[in-house]
Image (cartoon, rainbow, N blue to C red):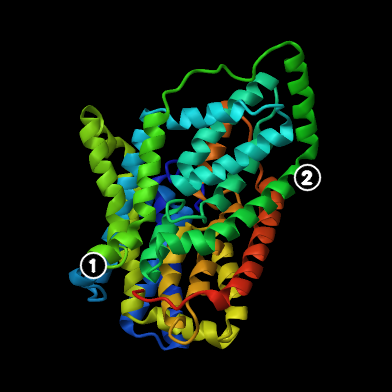
Amino acid sequence: MHSDDNGGVLTTKQLMLRMVMLLAISVGIGMAGAVFGGFTEKQVVASSVFLAIILGTLFFWTFRLSIAFLGLTVLVFTHSLSIESFVASAELPVILFLVGMMIVVGALRDLGFFTWVVQALISIPKMSGRKFIAATSVASALLACAVDEVTSIIFIATLIFQVCNRLKLNPTPYIIICVLCTNIGSAGTMMGNPVGIFIGTKAGLTFGDFFRWAFPIMLVSLGSCVAVTLVWFRKELNLFDERLQERMDRQLSLVPKVVVPYRRGLALLLFTLAFIASHHALEEGLGLDKNSILLVAPLACAGVVMIMKRERARYYVEHEVDWWTLLFFMLLFAIAGTLEHTEVTKVIADGFVNVCGDKPGILIPSIMATTAIGSAFVDNVIFVAAFSPVITALGETVPAMPLWWALLFGACFGGNITLIGSTANIVALGMLEKQSHAHVGFIQWLKIGALSAFIAMLIAWVMLSVMAPYMHPLAGAH
């Protein structure tokens, strides 16, 4: 998703030099589009600004919001983006959906829901290394579906550290396994990853569409990831069994068990999921626009939470909501929308068809592979934001729904390829270094990450190809 270079260790001279290089590369590639692709002046500006954001995210993660601010300024000054177009492209409903979900997740944390999940995992009867890691992997994937990938991995990683500390084991392999499964699980519903809700709104997909088409593919891909990683780390799991048996022989528990009043948290989560899941029926019954209830359901639940826990309401809004990231997303969506307004994405779509043809059997793996490789190194939201208008353009001549799913799975599964491929990876590895002072090498991760991602995407490709003829045409996409 991004590199660890935060810019803080650079001198002012080094920072300015890198910024000039970033600007030169972005403008150079944009001008190349004018020379070889016939880009207009506005298309050159739009593509240069978007490339600057991609490179800025990759090499200047700390400054990504600053670069987005400057890029937006350039677009407005050059008449490439109007204020009206900015508001239309900023995807404010998506931003508000994420705000609501972040507040609900904060309340779930307060209510002890995640602690209850952890306690349930360590209470598995006849515990073994393989049973423990399989249960935690599946739990991390399903939690990612219900809340989001980062929240899921934080709580699952905490459990892994506790268990490994008791057994005096290196937690690295168990963290890697659960992160890989978390990224796969994030493709199962709209809530697992920001790209899910973005794709859902752009394509006009409902929660039911995700549950019908994406969730089964996610489950099969998850099974493959668990199987591959259990074989890959079989020596470490054998050592887990030995240490666990020694501890059980001494009548010692893995971690202290506490009684958690989880029912209110579970009720809140189930109510939120039920509200979101029923949005399509409610919209049709009330005569509302498609996905309107979907986008406000988390806000409604967040509003109830803030009334019920009014003493924590301000804290939820100020501390649980990641305003920095959401503001970046909003600017990113608007700048990506400029690519569509200036018809850069139409040029890209035509080029894609010229290279790959217009057959879904070829377009599906091509889109999935392109998105996966890009998402392995750059924020997957950036890739999806840039590619979604291309899918819209392709959808004018071929069935669009399989292509949207290919985009989703490529973005989510591609995050497994490298250790910087997703936010969940970086958060988990940061916790690993802090808790255990362990470091995961790029090649160490790449071997198992690329293998698990390749198998998962192969499964997704095959299943999408089989399911594609049964997918209904999309209506209401924009």
Instruction: Label 2: state its secondary structure.
Output: helix
Residue 97: image location, x then y, percent:
31, 53
Q: Tell me which numbered mark, 1 or 2, is placed earlier along the sequence.
A: 2
Which residue in the structure is indicated by mark 2?
231
Residue 313: image location, x then y, percent:
23, 34
Residue drawn at x 68%, y 47% as measured from the top left: 226
Residue 172: image location, x then y, percent:
66, 35
The quarter of the picture where residue 235 lies is top right
Amino acid identity at mark 1 = Gly
Q: Which mark's residue is nearer the viewer, 1 or 2? A: 1
Instruction: Label 1: state its secondary structure.
Output: loop
Amino acid identity at mark 2 = Val
Dot label at residue 56:
none
Q: Is residue 29 visible?
A: yes
Residue 406: image location, x then y, percent:
54, 68
Q: Is residue 222 left or right of residue 395?
A: right
Residue drawn at x 45%, y 53% as measured from the top left: 193
| As drawn, 82 above or below 64 | below
| As drawn, 238 above or below 20 | above
Residue drawn at x 63%, y 25% as measured from the top left: 163
Which residue in the structure is indicated by mark 1?
287
Task: Identify the image quadrant of the C terminus.
Answer: bottom left
* Most foreground residue, 381 or 302: 302
